Image: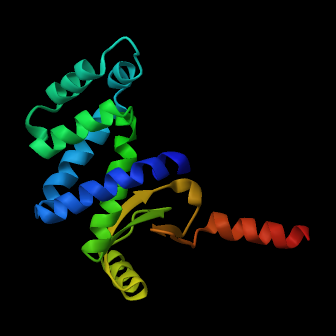
Amino acid sequence: MAEKTTIARPYAEAVFELACVQDALDAWSESLKFAADMVRVPDVQGLIGNPRIPKRTLAELLLDIGGDKFSEGGKNLIRLLVENGRVSLLPEIAQLFEAKKADAEQKIDAQVTSAAPIKEAARERLAAALEKRLGRAVVLHFEVDESLLGGAVIRAGDLVIDGSVTAQLSKLRLALSH
């Protein structure tokens, strides 16, 4: 994964710079999300991995699938990635682009996994606390995982706050075993 990210980074940075110049961050974001989803489809992965399909044909197939989802710059990116044998990196490119976009917009996505649904008032308090701690706007995404037993796990960028009962029991188990 780290190797893919390293290879994808220059493409993501170039696309981000172009999107900034074009004042089209949201349009590029949507285009990259679509392209990333497209190359995750098993049938498309089969096309990408088939050495019998010429690069030009593969690029045109992908552009046909995308239809009007790609701007001229987006089409050029697809062609370039196919030509360089890097089209399978679109999910990593999209992820890196989104991270740069969020950073530029002073926003961060946070995944909150809880043992039970969180009420709206608690969601608002959590968002406010995270915004204060991280110094930027926080976009929360919620998920329920009953295996946590209680509490929640929050992931925002490199920050992980594990307040789950499962984690606390693990720490207690470890402390008692020593």
Q: Residue at x 77, y 71 (%)?
A: 172
Colour setting: rainbow
Q: Nearer the viewer, residue 129 or 57?
A: 57
Image position, residue 128 (x, y; %) = 34, 84
Q: Residue at x 44, y 57 (%)?
A: 144
Image position, residue 151 (x, y; %) = 54, 70
Residue 35 seen anywhere in this rendered image of the structure = yes
Residue 71 seen anywhere in this rendered image of the structure = no
Displayed quadrant of residue 129: bottom left
Residue furthest to the left:
68
Image side of residue 151 versus residue 135, left or right = right
Q: Nearer the viewer, residue 28 or 150?
A: 28
Residue furthest to the right:
178
Image position, residue 2 (x, y; %) = 54, 51
In the rendered image, the quadrant that contains the C terminus is bottom right
Q: Residue at x 31, y 41 (%)?
A: 36
Image side of residue 4 versus residue 77, left or right = right
How many numbered circles does the render carry? 0
Is residue 147 placed above or below 139 in the rendered structure? above
Is residue 39 placed above or below 175 in the rendered structure? above
Image position, residue 50 (x, y; %) = 40, 16
Is residue 63 placed above or below 51 in the rendered structure? below
Q: Residue at x 83, y 73 (%)?
A: 175
Q: Nearer the viewer, residue 43 or 77?
A: 77
